[in-house]
Amino acid sequence: MKSKFDPRKHHRRSIRLKGYDYSQTGAYYVTIVTQGRECLFGEIIDKEMYLSNYGEIVQKWWNEIPIHFPNVETGAFVIMPNHTHGNIFIFEERRDEVLSPRDNPNYKYQNANIGDTYNQGVETPPLHKPTLGQILAYFKYQSTKEMNGVETDKAITKFWQRNYYEHIIRNEKELQQKTDYILDNPSRWDEDDENPLKQ
């Protein structure tokens, strides 16, 4: 028998800061975890991370973020066996000339979350600055697409959990704290809450 929808049980609570504009200039610390916390991206040996083929793909697409989003820079980043941590910076100004929305290869994707579609004969909307969610969705989509193209003995179609964790970095002290945490992460794997072998 099919159970009734119960908003107290089935409502997906947003973990974003209510009313905050995630496309505005700012620094953000983000964590993205694999589906089922499966260790796909490599292993840590003697407190150093050794990337698998999947891990190398994840690194590649993190590095590609500023190419696809001209007003975005990436900072410290670490790939762990089943999650990533990184700093992302969104700026007001773009680094180069902006393509018109129709000519921009990312237009359809960038606007997928806000319901925009391109119809011939309809006025083309202006190209909006991407939100943090759109940037991370692009990263997850592209890395998943390439990882699914890798020869493997098991089919995996969904590599990432649906959501992600973010923290708005408010000042230089917080930025330094998050950067240190990211860089030191492999050395603390034994105590990491995401480590399936944690005692």
Image (cartoon, grey):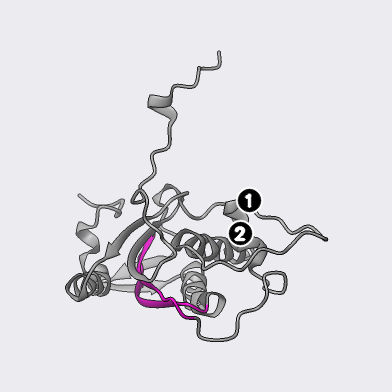
Of the 4 image quadrants, the one containing the N terminus is: top right
| The quadrant where residue 14 appears | top left
Q: Would you say 156 lies left or right of 59 here?
A: right
Residue 156 in view here: no
Residues under numbered marks 2 and 1 in contact, where contact means CB atoms less than 8 Å apart: yes
Disc 2 marks which amino acid?
Answer: Asn
Name the residue beneath numbered marker 2: 111
Name the residue beneath numbered marker 1: 115
Residue at x 19% of width, y 71% of height: 177
Residue 109 at x, y percent in the picture: 63, 61
Foreground pick, 25 / 3: 25
Q: What residue span does the magenta drawing correspond to?
A: 70-93
| Residue 87 is one of the magenta-drawn residues | yes
Residue 54 in view here: yes
- Element at badge 1? loop
Residue 9 at x, y percent in the picture: 39, 26
| Residue 122 is one of the magenta-drawn residues | no
- Work out whether 67 lies above or below 57: below
Foreground pick, 43 / 80: 80
Within 10 Å of disc 1 (Cα), the crowding (few <14, some 14-19, many 20+) is few
Residue at x 23% of width, y 52% of height: 198
Q: How many marks?
A: 2
| The quadrant where residue 90 appears | bottom left
Q: Residue furthest right?
A: 121
